Image (tube, grey):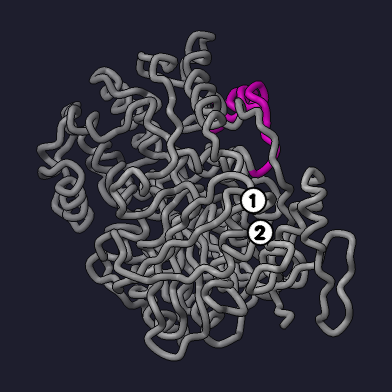
Amino acid sequence: MVTDGWLVCQGLRAHEHGRRERCNLRGVLVHARKLALAVTCASVALVGAPAVASAAGDPFAGYENQQLTWGACPFPTEPGAKDAQCAMVTVPRDWAAPTGGVDMQVSISRVKASGASLGPILINPGGPGGQGTGLAGILAALEPTVGARYDFIGMDPRGTGHEGDTTAAGAPIACQVPTGRLPQDPLDARDRSAKSIAEHQQIPRAVAEACQSVAESPFLTTWQTAHDMELIRQLLGAPKLNYLGYSYGSWLGAKYASLFPGSAGKIVLDSSVNWQGRLEADFEDFPVIDQRQFDQVYVPWLTRTQPDVFGATPDAVRQKWEQVRAYYKSQGVSGDRYDDVWVGMGSKFAWLQATQIFQAGIKALGGATPASSELQRQLDAQAQTTFGKPAAAVTAQDVKAVIPPDYVAVEDVRYAVACGDQPTRSAAWYKGLSDRQGPKYPLFGWQYGISETCGFWSDAPRQTLPTLPASVAKNVLVVQGEFDPQTGYEQAHAAVKAAPGVSLISVDDSPYHGQYALTANPCVDGMVNVFLLDNSRPGSNTCPGVPLIGETEVFPVPGPVKSPAAQSFGSFAQVSGPAALREHAQEFIRRTNALR
């Protein structure tokens, strides 16, 4: 039987009334060197091959005929989350040449709908390289009305390992970077000497060379993972695969829908990159959007919440911030790593941790003692979580211990995807970007360009990723915070503008990364849930943000969202689910999508 999942071979036209031409599989194998044909026909064979091997031998049949064996998951269930079952899926190393190379294993999880199921919704936390199996039970608990009607499917994408599996087989694929090639001194990108720039570039050069030497790297791409997702849809027996992806997960979801438009169900892309453009452009915007959040949202918040400690004006706060930066440097904390505390600050936990580190530095310099407040109560709780002691007892050495060094171990998927999906810029181009961004966006502008691994990536992409076809635009809903410091609002807006028919829910004044189910915003949750449950996708609209930590009202900030936010949540359902679980998920999404 011909299904909606069948694809049309490049150069062939679809018949009327839904009939499709199918590629000749033998032609694919004979002409495997012709990559464009192999790529296109591999996609067709994946979704259209018969359930049993043909007489000539079907290289996809073994994958399509496998049976999912569900059992206990290897990871513990987070308090308040739903219990999940897990299974392993065998996938070819290369969907374009399935008979070559050693097969790979992808782990998936499932939380079955508590009522009549509308089908599976696959979730991805981003990264690239984030594991999603543990997230299925969390989101099913945070959005119980959706959990009643959808089977939540988590996935640990190829190369990311298997969440909770502590054996060697369950570990993510890592890049073995020789530490002898790395700089030994603390780095500060504000130092623009030739020596400093050369030392900074040692790290991305060594990482790029190490990751490109890993045999699996060419096959840890969005194109390959999207084909894994299509196989998962088949094995679940679902005519459509619905999807919820955060951050890089928006790129993955959009590319899945672009490669397999007939299989794409409802697609929610939260905290979105420009999936119609360049993935690397999102990372290149980090200095811009981090500086914007720091200057326009974070610093004014400090002046409102603890002016006696941090300063009553933005200028006073920035002056103290520089003094504290110098103090931590004198205690052996790299200037770059101090700056990084305020980079990608997309969760409440990250805000509290940065503020705690700032506060501890002020205290060490003889600054004012903070008064009792709701914010201080949360800062004290954060200090216990991070440092194991009250906020007043935190020292510079405690801070140094939790701030990562200039080099940390890297996982291959992060760079194989970011640098391997599309052609990259050169190291010289990124050095020029650093020179241009540094004076305007000093928080991260000096550092980013001279630390970008993709500038030293020499391998060319093996496949070309398509843009979203008009036929699936009506199935896509994008959600984006105005002051998100990890995926810029302009990136999401550009994607929607380049894909007429896609809806955009803007969240006014929000500085967080990850909106749906993570920020206790009933407007956002309500609009997404209406889309998922009622077959009624909202048009492009604006939701108000939620108050920042320790505050009871939203303080409007001028920014790229121009339309006024709704002043009432109307009939939208109230947010449900445990607050601690929601904040855990928000921090998980933020950390998964950090640059380091």
Residue at figure coordinates x 53%, y 37% from the top left: 287
Tag 2 and tag 1, C-beta contact below 8 Å:
yes
The image shows residue 304 at horizontal and vertical percentages of 32, 51
Quadrant (top left/top right/bottom left/bottom right) for the C terminus: top left
Q: Say whether residue 141 is magenta.
A: no
Task: Return the residue at label 1.
Answer: 99
> In the picture provided, is 565 more to the left or to the right than 87?
right
The image shows residue 248 at horizontal and vertical percentages of 54, 52
> In the picture provided, is 116 more to the left or to the right than 3?
left
The amino acid at mark 2 is: Pro
Instruction: Report the magenta stretch's main SS.
Output: helix
Q: Secondary structure at mark 1?
A: loop
The amino acid at mark 1 is: Thr
Query: Can you name the residue that lies furthest to the bottom here?
Result: 116
Task: Return the residue at label 2.
Answer: 59
Residue at figure coordinates x 50%, y 27% from the top left: 210
Looking at the image, is 460 positioned above or below residue 334? below
User: Foreground: 462 or 497?
Assistant: 462
> In the picture provided, is 595 more to the left or to the right than 241?
left
Residue at figure coordinates x 55%, y 65% from the top left: 479
The image shows residue 422 at horizontal and vertical percentages of 68, 42
Residue at figure coordinates x 67%, y 45% from the top left: 278
Looking at the image, is 560 positioned above or below residue 241? above
Q: Say whether residue 433 is magenta.
A: yes
